[in-house]
Image (spheres, rainbow, N blue to C red):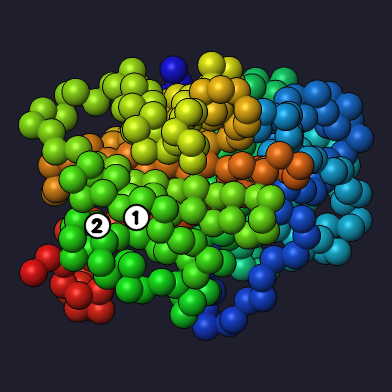
Amino acid sequence: MMTRLNPFAVFIVSLVLLSCGDVKLPATGQEDEIILFADDSTWTFLERTVRSVFQDTVFTPQPELWFVVRRAPMADFGKYEKHMNRILLAPLDGTGPAAEFMRRSLGPSVQQLVEQGEEFVINKYDPKARGQILMYLTGPDLASLRSSMENEAPELLYYFKRTSLRRELASVQSESGYHKKEIERSLLKRYDWTMTIQHDYLVARDSAEGGFFWVRRATPADMERWIFVAWREVKDPRILTDRYAIALRDSLTRRYMRTIDEEAFVEIAPYYLQIENISFLDRFAYEMRGNWRFSDKTGGGPFVNYTFYDEGTRRVYVLDGSIFAPRVEKKKLILQVDALLHTFRTIHELSDKEKVELGEGRD
């Protein structure tokens, strides 16, 4: 079990560039493509490390790369200035246009931190367009840079995943006029929590007694997205462990997510399961990513799950998104349901204005 580091932890500098009144256009390029700029000597030394770090595989259960790295010449840096995902890779002692650009881009104080081994990654968000990340990866020399990349590999990849999620959340918000507000109001009124319900999701199950709410989207007809929220009143939050999270999900899907003939049910597949403790919506949580399957092994697909304790409502919540799409790539669909899970909020997190708009919770 891994513990995800805080994105603003030691060795990380994050430069968030905010627009000063200028309306920026959306970033261009492919969601899963990273354009990388590096001098020849740097690329020869670090290509294997770069691909190992950023071309991580997600099994859905078919292997899919989260991102594909494509190297571009430094002369084309301006050509890609509005691209979604970019990396500038160069050591401070390097020679060549990428290394020269790196030194010009970093101020003396930052270069000193790099030389001292205290920093090696600097992120700029939205420098030229909305939804961008430009990552500077550097070190005193090539050997130090490779060591830092290998030691912090999960976090480096996480920055790009997080930016993809941010873009998807912005897309969800842009369609707020089409969301099913009546369902969102009903959830808050009856259960003291709410989340975004997009216009093409239908309620599949709503059990106040069982503490289980499930919506599904079946458009197009051969592709399904399932999202459920479950909650349990608990007296002692110490009950929450990784084993508890796994067992709770299986018990919920066994009871509520069954085939029409009731002969089979959804369960966690015993392969490619990853679980780690993270910060999810400012709460300690267990994140599960893996694959589900029908108990009769007639079908399956990927899922993402967050299980956490909420102090305000004194409940353990389970937020889960699953995909069934046998004939297409599924990593984008996983991102879509993940974004919707991140819209979850309890009544205690809503502003007074939002409470009024959504009906002020329970009667």
Which residue was labeled with disc 1? 344
Crowdedness near tag 1: few (<14), some (14–19) or many (≥20) residues, C-alpha within 10 Å: some
Three-letter code, disc 1: Phe
Percent from the top left, x then y, of residue 251?
33, 27
Residue drawn at the location 89% of the way across and 58% of the way down? 76
Vertical relation: 99 (above or below) 116:
below
Which image quadrant is residue 37 in?
top right
Residue drawn at the location 41% of the way across and 71% of the way down? 180
Vertical relation: 328 (above or below) 234:
below
**Does 109 sit left or right of 5 as displayed?**
right
Q: Which SS class for mark 2?
A: strand
Q: Which SS class for mark 1?
A: loop
Three-letter code, disc 2: Trp
Percent from the top left, x then y, of residue 359?
20, 75
Q: How far apart in space, not on screen, are marks 2 and 1 (Cα)? A: 7 Å
The answer, for residue 59, to whether it is visible in the render is no
The answer, for residue 146, to whether it is visible in the render is yes
Which residue was labeled with disc 2? 193
Q: Which mark is residue 22?
A: none
Crowdedness near tag 2: few (<14), some (14–19) or many (≥20) residues, C-alpha within 10 Å: many
Residue drawn at the location 78% of the way across and 60% of the way down? 29
Percent from the top left, x then y, of residue 312?
14, 49
